[in-house]
Amino acid sequence: MRSLPVGEHGLLVLVDDVRAAVAAARLVRELAADPAASGLAPPRDVVPAARTVLLDGLPGPVEVEAWRDRLGDAPQPSQAGPSGARDQARELTIETRYDGADLAVVAAAWRCGVAEVVERHQAAVFLVAFCGFAPGFAYCVPAEPMPEVPRREAPRERVPRGSVALAGEYCGVYPAAMPGGWQLVGTTTAVLFDPDRDRPALLVPGDTVRFRAAP
C-alpha cells in the first residue's frame, strides 16, 4: 500500500479501488485496536473514502513513519473480510419494501427481471465503505462485485426518507427527504440518523449490511 504523510500528525493511505479501501480501513482499525500487540500508536480518527484511508491525529512524525513502514510492508488488500476490531464492525439487517420507482431501470441495467433484481439485492452482502453527502448517508459496496447501475440523467428534486437506492457500484439509503439522482429500488422504516442516539448514524464504515424484504 502506498501512503503519504499529511502534516506531522496524519497519514493518507492510497489504494486502487473501494473494496481495497474497505479492507485497508479494517486493517488499520485492527492494528489500532491493540497497540500493545501492534506497537503502533492509535490515530485519533480513521477516515475512509473511495480510494483512500486517512489516519488523523497521530502523536507526531515518528508515529506517522511507524505506521507508514508497517502498512508499506503489508500487501494491498483486495477484499474486505470480517473485521477483528473490537468495537467497530457490526452486522445489520435492513428490512426493505421493494416498491422503488426505478426497479425496471435496474432490471434493464442488469439484464434480468424485476423479481431477480430483488433476489440479487437480498442475496448480496454489503460493506459500509464510507459516509458523506448527508448525515447518516452510507456508501455501501457489495462484497462481491455486481453490475453497475447508471445514475438518473436528471436528479429528483425530492427523494423520500428511507429510500433504498443504487448508483454506480454503490447502494445507499436516504436518511432524510432530499434531492437525489440514484435509482430507487425500495423503502425502509429504519432510522438512518438520529442525533439523540448514542451512535447517531445507523451505518458506519466497517459495518456489514444485508437487505431483507419486509414482511
Image (cartoon, grey):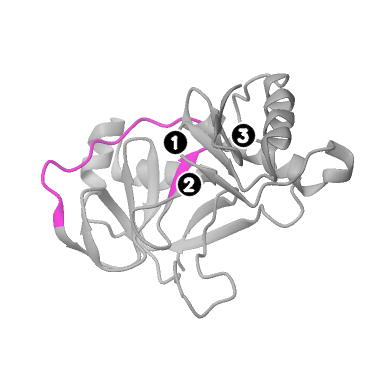
Q: Is residue 77 left or right of residue 112?
A: right
Against 76, residue 166 (above or below) is below
Q: Residue furthest right?
A: 36
Q: Amino acid at mark 1?
A: Ala
Where is residue 109? Give x, y as percent. 26, 33
Against 196, residue 179 (above or below) is above
One can see residue 126 in this view: no
Q: Amino acid at mark 3?
A: Ala
Q: Amino acid at mark 2?
A: Phe
User: Viewer-proximal residue, 121 or 46?
Assistant: 46
Q: Are marks 1 and 3 in contact (CB under 8 Å)?
A: no
One can see residue 137 in this view: yes
User: Viewer-proximal residue, 165 or 60?
Assistant: 60
Element at label 2? strand
Q: Residue at x 37, y 63 (%)?
A: 97
User: Viewer-proximal residue, 55 or 77?
Assistant: 55
Where is residue 1? Give x, y as percent. 61, 21
Which circle marks residue 130 in the picture? 2
**Start-end of magenta stretch:** 139-156
Q: Residues within 10 Å of mark 3 (few under 14, many from 20)?
A: many
Q: Which residue is mark 1?
A: 50
Against 192, residue 71 (above or below) is above
Element at label 1? loop
Q: Which residue is mark 3?
A: 23
Q: Are marks 1 and 2 in contact (CB under 8 Å)?
A: yes
Where is residue 200? Give x, y as percent. 51, 70
**Inter-mark Cα distance, 2 to 3:** 12 Å
Q: Main secondary structure of the magenta part?
A: loop
Asked if the stretch drawn in magenta spans residue 148, the answer is yes
Q: Is residue 86 left or right of residue 75?
A: right
**Inter-mark Cα distance, 1 to 2:** 7 Å
